[in-house]
Amino acid sequence: MEIAHQEPSTRSGAMTFVQSEVFARTFREGMALVEETANYLDGEGREASKALSRSAALSYAGASMRLTTQLMQIASWLLVLRAVRESDMSVDEASESKYRLGDREKSSSDLLSGELPKKLMVLIEGASQLYDRIARLDRDLFKSGRSDGATNDAVAQQRALLDAFGGRRG
């Protein structure tokens, strides 16, 4: 098992982030979206899907599987960072490639969004926005070795913002 050792400033930036209120809010938001989606797909969504046309029902099934996969990736990333926050995992361990957020699966072009339940579309959009935000954080926090210095600059800027606005938790 190869561990991608982080530069000291990257480790420090990741530790600053996981102790911040920004992380705490992101964690709560992510887990709430996972729970809301699970409740919808097991209840109201299941009933709504029964009323769809055959083609829309197939589209619903594909969209709900992609949504579930995306939310599980989000939850996994958040739980790894919570483990870092709680000192159950080091930043070096959390930086391993197996914990990185993968590329998002592109949605199918045959998605019949006009026929799908509005609530499902709202959940898909919310998950998509959260995934994009977390993907940016993942790149900023864990991609070391870039020669342009952008990662360290971004972490330094984030740390400065957290310091300036009291985002650190004591």
Image: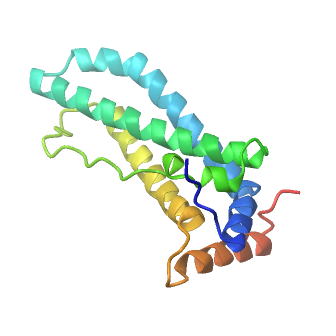
Q: Is residue 85 left or right of residue 51?
A: right
Q: Residue at x 61, y 77 (%)?
A: 152
Q: Residue at x 36, y 36 (%)?
A: 67
User: Vertically, is 108 above or below 164?
Assistant: above
The one of 39 and 15 positioned closer to us in this rendering: 15
Residue 76's spot in the image, x, y percent?
54, 39
For the view shown, which residue lies furthest in the bottom direction? 148
Residue 5's spot in the image, x, y percent?
63, 63
For the image shown, how many numbered marks are present on the structure?
A: 0
Q: Residue at x 73, y 77 (%)?
A: 160
| Colour pattern of the rendering | rainbow
The one of 98 and 128 positioned closer to us in this rendering: 98
Q: Is residue 141 left or right of residue 54?
A: right
Residue 84's spot in the image, x, y percent?
72, 48
Q: Is residue 142 left or right of residue 128?
A: right
**Image quarter of the C terminus:** bottom right
User: Vertically, is 104 above or below 63?
Assistant: below
Does residue 154 show up? yes
Residue 1's spot in the image, x, y percent?
55, 47
Q: Is residue 163 left or right of residue 26?
A: right
Does residue 118 show up? no
The quadrant in which residue 51 appears is: top left
